[in-house]
Amino acid sequence: MAKMNGNPMPIKDVLGKLSIDELRLKGKRVFIRADFNVPLDEHLRITDDSRIRSTLTTINYAIDEGARVILASHLGRPKGKPDPRFSLAPVAKRLQRLLDKDVIFSPDCIGSQVEHLVAKMKDGDVVLLENLRYHPEEEKNDEEFSKKLAGIADYFINDAFGAAHRAHASTVGITKFLPSAAGFLMKKEIEYLKGVVDNPIRPFVAILGGAKVSGKIGVLEHLEDKVDKVVVGGGMAFTFIKAMGNEVGDSLVETEMIETAERIRKNLKAAGIKFYLPVDCVIAHNLEPGAETKIVPTLEIPKGWKALDIGPATVKLFSEALENAKTILWNGPMGVFEVDAFSRGTYAIANAVADAYALTIVGGGDTALAVHRAGVTNALSFISTGGGASLQLLEGKELPGIAALTDRSTAAV
Ligand code: AMP
C-alpha cells in the first residue's frame, strides 16, 4: 500500500556536488563507476541483478545524451590479480540484455587494449571494463593507476554508492584528474539517507535492529536530535535490556556496550524521545531449523535459551508506534530472519512499514533482503543499495567517494 512512492515531495539538493545532468555529455568519453558487485552462483550465473538495474537510469541517460559510455566496477575480492571467478563478463551479458544494445567487454581496465577499444567508440557506444580489483593499485588508491583510468575519459561519474565509503582509485583517485559528478543513483541515495533523514517530516520513527549495538551506535547518536521515536529489535535489543538490570538468558549481549547502551537510552528519554524495546520474544536453545521454540515475555527468558525473534505482542507494539509516523527509517532485522522459525517478526515489521502512511526508507544489506523476501519492496519509498555506505551516511559521516566529487560552486564545465 504505497501512498508516498517515488518522489513524494520535492527533495532539497543536499549534495553541493556536480551531478551528471549538469554536464554536456554529447561525444564525450564518460567513465561511470558503477557497483556491479553482484552475487554469482557456482556456474557464475548472476543470482540477483538489482545492483545492475539500479544504475540503469544513469547509463541510459548517458547513452541517450550521446556519450561514449565506459563502465567500471569491482566484483568480489580477487586479491589484486586476474581470477575468472570474479570476472565481470557475466555482467556484460546481463547489461546487454537490460540495455537492449551491444556491450563491448574489455578484458582489462587499463592498458593499450582498452585504449584501442575506447578510441574506436562512437557516440552512444558502451564498453564495460574488467574487474578493477584485478589490480592491487585499485584498493591502494594508487595515483599512477588512477591516472591511467582517467586517461581514457573526459568525465568521471560516480554511481557506485555501495563503494562510496571506500577511498579507492576508481572512487577517489580518479577525481583528481577529471571533472567528477554524481550519477542519479548516487544522488538519490544521498537525497534520501541524508536529505530526508537530516530534515525529516515529523513524527520521525527510526527502527533499528540487527546483531550488534556497536554497529548502530553511530546511527543512534546521529539521530538523537532528529527522531521522535526509536524502536529497537533484533539481537541489539538485549544489550539495552541487560543494561536496565534484567536477565536475558543466553541472548546476544555485548558486555562492553552495556554502559553505552544505558547512556543512550537515558539521553533519548531525557530528550523526550520514546524508546521501544521488545516485550516478548521467540526463544530457542539454538538456531537449528527443527529446534524447539517458545514465545515468552522478554523479562522471562530462561537460562540456556536465546531470544532470536520478536514476539507477537512486540509486533503489535512496534506497529502501533509507526501509526502516526510521517517518516520511517528502518535498518536491521528484528530477528534471525534467515531461519524460517525466527523470520516472522521481521516480515511483520516489513509489512507494518509498507502499510504506514509515511515516507519509508530502508537501509541496505540485510534489511533490503528481508523487505524483498516479505514481498513489499515496491511499497516502500526508498531502499538503499549500500550496506556499509548507508550506515556511514546515517551516522552523519562524510563518504570519501562523495567528498571527492567536484564541488558545484567550483565546477567549470
Ligand atoms: P547487522 O549486520 O548488525 O544489521 O545484523 C544482521 C544480523 O543480525 C542478521 O544476520 C540476523 O540474523 C542477526 N540477528 C538479528 N536478530 C538477532 C538475535 N536476536 N540474535 C542473534 N542475531 C540476530
Image (cartoon, rainbow, N blue to C red):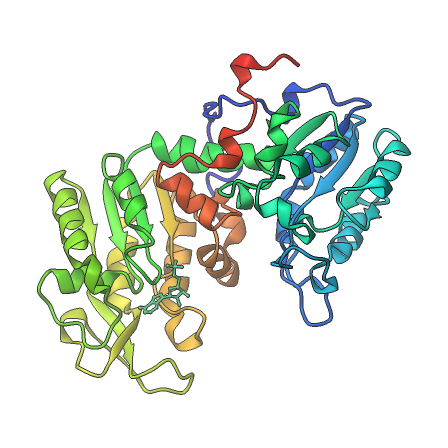
Is 329 placed above or below 347 here?
above
Q: Quadrant of ligand 1?
A: bottom left
In depth, the one of 216 and 148 nearer the eye is 148
Q: Quadrant of the C terminus?
A: top right
Front residue of 121 and 330? 121
Q: Quadrant of residue 197?
A: top left
Q: Residue at x 46, y 59 (%)?
A: 366
Residue 323 visible somewhere in the drawing: no
Measured along the vertical axis of the image, is residue 282 above or below residue 387?
below
Percent from the top left, x then y, of residue 134? 69, 53
Q: Quadrant of residue 23?
A: top right
- Residue at position x 28%, y 42% in the image: 324
Up-down: is 294 above or below 220?
below
Q: Which residue ends up furthest to the front in the rendered image?
A: 144
Quadrant hosting residue 394: top left
Count of numbered marks: 0
Q: Where is 304 relative to 346, above or below?
A: below
- Which residue is found at the position 70% from the left and 43% from the top? 72
Q: At 71% across and 36% down in the image, what residue appears? A: 149
Where residue 398 appears, as percent x and y from the top left, is 42, 34
Residue 330 shows in the view: yes
Between 259 and 204, which is closer to the camera in this rendering? 259
